[in-house]
Image (spheres, rainbow, N blue to C red):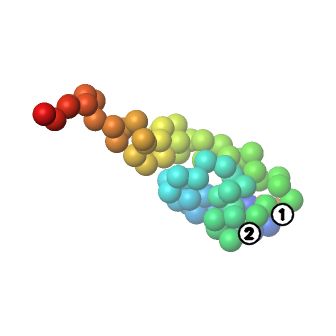
């Protein structure tokens, strides 16, 4: 479905950008090629993005905390 009439952005495009790690609707639009025009769609688009990140709290990306070992071992 179309989310943004001004730019003809679909929900699938916005979700794909969110899954790549973008958390802000304005940033998502820039990633898709054009920023918002009238802005009427931004709150709906942000809701889609927030929904993606609720399902994937870290946007599917590995966080710094996950990269650390649980216990550091000193080598002799
Ligand atoms: S409907 Fe998206 S910027 Fe106008």
The residue where tag 1 is placed is 37
Q: Is mark 2 within 8 Å of ligand 1?
A: no
Location of residue 25 with respect to 34 vertically, above or below: above
* Displayed quadrant of residue 69: top left
Is residue 7 at least partly visible in the picture? yes
Please provide percent x and percent y for residue 52.
Answer: 53, 45
Q: How far apart are marks 2 and 1 (CA)?
A: 8 Å
Q: Residue 75: horizontal and vertical position, in percent?
A: 16, 35
Q: Which residue is drawn at 69% across and 61% down?
A: 29
Kindly check if marks 2 and 1 are in contact, taking CB atoms under 8 A apart as contact. yes
- Quadrant (top left/top right/bottom left/bottom right) for the N terminus: bottom right
Closest to the observer: 29 or 3? 29
Report the residue at 77% width, 53% height from top: 41
24 left or right of 54 in image: right
Ligand 1 within 8 Å of disc 1? The answer is: yes
Who's the residue at 69% across and 64% down the image?
30
For residue 34, the mark is: 2
């Amino acid at each position: 479905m179309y989310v943004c009439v001004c730019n003809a952005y679909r929900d699938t495009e916005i979700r794909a950008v969110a899954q790549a790690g973008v958390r802000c609707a304005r940033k998502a639009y820039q990633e898709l090629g054009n920023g918002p025009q009238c802005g009427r769609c931004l709150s709906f688009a942000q809701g889609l993005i927030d929904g993606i990140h609720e399902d994937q709290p870290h946007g599917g990306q590995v966080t710094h905390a996950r990269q650390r070992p649980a216990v550091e071992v000193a080598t002799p």
